[in-house]
Image (tube, rainbow, N blue to C red):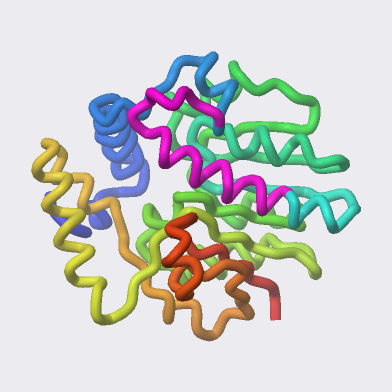
Amino acid sequence: MFLNDAAILPTKSRNQNFERLYIALREQEQRLYTDEQVRQLPDIAPTNLHYKEWRIRKHSAERLISYLNKKKRRLNILEIGCGNGWLSAQLAKIKGANVIGQDINRVEIDQAKRVFQRNNLEFFCEEFDAVKFKYKFFDVIVFAASLQYFPSLKQILNQALSCLSVVGEIHLLDTNFYNQSNIDSAIQRTLVYYTKIGYPELAGYYFHHRLDDLQGFDHKILANPNTIMKRLQKGNPFYWISIKKK
């Protein structure tokens, strides 16, 4: 099974197959952490293999939280693809926030439930389905390093938009976006990487989205890593994008 052949599997089988491969890969990449390590995230020991990555994620989280704090009102927040729940837990520290973290990965969701216990924070192991939130609207929906696991950017964003309150916003963090000139090489690099590490099937669950796929959405680039200044600073390499209802 290569590239996007995984999409032909029934949803339940596809999710179970993905979870099995994903957890095996994360273990091999040393991305599975103890409960105490998860409790401290995004702070992690400088000796950790992924220390630089967590510095970037910490920066992304801090600027989002600062942005949301300025709203100074109660916020219902949904994080789609929350993994072990560290970011959802950080968002739950915002005054007046109620947060739901959702992911199909039971291993990490179970860990999130163990580690992060707050009255204003819930975790659910399930595939995102806008119908389930038919009568619940969110002020903020966050995708942090998770959009690449959804085959259609437009489809998932439209579903998320249907769950937004009138003044709600979607925030896209820690996600690569491509253009027509570099997307094919990116797809090939992904396949080569997963093949080299021993999990070529995972290439069928990883999707590369173009920045121009956001055309037609009321979106705003809050941080652009490709400005001359950002490139010189060699800081956060990811876009930060907000999307509102039209």
- Residue 50 locus on image (x, y percent): 37, 34
Q: Quadrant of the C terminus?
A: bottom right
The answer to if 30 sits in the magenta stretch is no
Please name the residue shown 38% across and 25% down the image. 48
Horizontal arrangement in the rendering, residue 246 relative to residue 97 (left or right): left
Q: Residue at position x 25%, y 34% from top? A: 21
Q: Quadrant of residue 22?
A: top left
Q: Residue at x 43, y 24 (%)?
A: 107
- Whether 92 is drawn above or below 164: the answer is above
Instruction: Indicate the position of residue 128 as horizontal and vertical percent values.
Output: 53, 49
The single residue placed furthest to the front in the displayed view is: 232
Relative to residue 65, is residue 229 drawn left or right?
Answer: left
Q: Is residue 210 visible?
A: yes
Q: Nearer the viewer, residue 105 or 69?
A: 69
Residue under the point 11% across and 52% down:
192
Most foreground residue, 54 or 138: 54
Q: Is residue 70 above or below residue 87?
A: below
Residue 169 screen position, x and y as percent: 70, 64
Q: Position of residue 110 (x, y in %)?
A: 52, 22
Farthest residue, direction bottom: 216
Q: Main secondary structure of the magenta part?
A: helix
Q: Is residue 58 magenta?
A: yes
On screen, residue 178 versus residue 87, left or right, reads left
Q: Which residues are magenta?
A: 43-65
